[in-house]
Amino acid sequence: MSDFEHRAAGREARRAAPHSPWTPEEEHRQDLLQRYLGALAHAAAAEAATKAGEPTTGSAETPPTRAERRTGGRAPQSPHVRDVMRVPAVSVPGDLPFLDVARTLSRERLSAVPVVDAEDHVVGVVSESDLLAKAAVMAVPHRAGPLARLREHRLYEKSRGETAATLMTYPAITVHPGDPVADAAWTAARSRLKRLPVTDHHGRLVGAVSRSDLLRSLIRNDAEIREEIESRILRREFLPASDVVEVTVDNGVVTLAGRLDTALVPQLVGAVRDIEDVTDVVDRLNAQ
């Protein structure tokens, strides 16, 4: 490998390293994700308190949250896995040969695929990492020393397999259609998995959900926030302002500009500020 290739590989490795600094966009998305999950946790706690007969809103000590003000104290309905999962899910049988598993991942553009038995029960997952270990053993004889062989024994033995069942990682980490998206997101984050099989309560495969599917359902983009402001607030609650107020959204920060009755400005700004995923509101209404 040339010096140029070494430097390029080093830069790529640093970019992929877990401790590498996040971009401003990633920091913002992570902040929104944390805010959303916190809101869901608060809503769950409020619902549990309601079932226990404890007051959750209206007291001086605990003012109502945004979601509670908008829903009259009712906990908001959080999205569930069934709302975002993809069906049908790609799977492979346990007796599928190694090369056919690799072709399936390449054809479907997947990093991992669930392995199922004859009744569609998920018995494991075979990933690119499993196949990479297999390919490495095929390409180069295993020449590690005694300590390395002891440390890598399980991986090496597994990589000698020839089928999906002998190469897969098990038991598989799965989620259910009725699980909250927030729970599935934490499962994917803790397990560092890009894709999770979705199973029914009998363990049968019914779909799949990816990290990007989960993230999109938790965090709305700027266009969706703007659409809610224009359709739900301006056209329904402030109809006279719908043609004179300009709305722009940048990374969750909403800017309102235009001419509006001065008495309505605080109400409009407050309504926009109460929208989930809005991080700030810039009031440029009636600005000279």
Image (cartoon, rainbow, N blue to C red):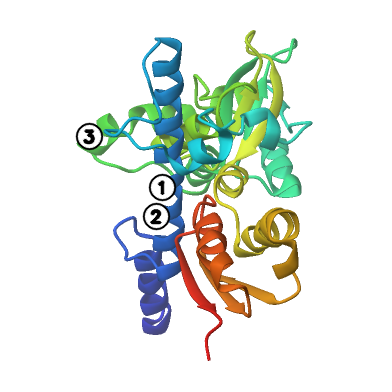
Which quadrant holds the N terminus?
A: bottom left
Question: Which mark sits nearer the N-terminus, 3 or 2?
Answer: 2
Give the amino acid at mark 2.
Asp
Give the amino acid at mark 1.
Arg
Name above or below for residue 6 compared with residue 62. below
Dot in front, 3 or 2: 2
Label 1 secondary element: helix
Q: Which residue in the protein does label 1 denote?
A: 35
Q: Are marks 2 and 1 in contact (CB under 8 Å)?
A: yes
Within-10-Å neighbours for mark 2: few <14, some 14–19, many 20+:
few
Within-10-Å neighbours for mark 1: few <14, some 14–19, many 20+:
some
Question: Which mark sits nearer the N-terminus, 3 or 1?
Answer: 1
Q: Are marks 3 and 1 in contact (CB under 8 Å)?
A: no
Q: Which residue in the protein does label 2 denote?
A: 31
Q: Which mark is residue 146?
A: 3
**Horizontally, is 104 left or right of 274 in the view?**
right
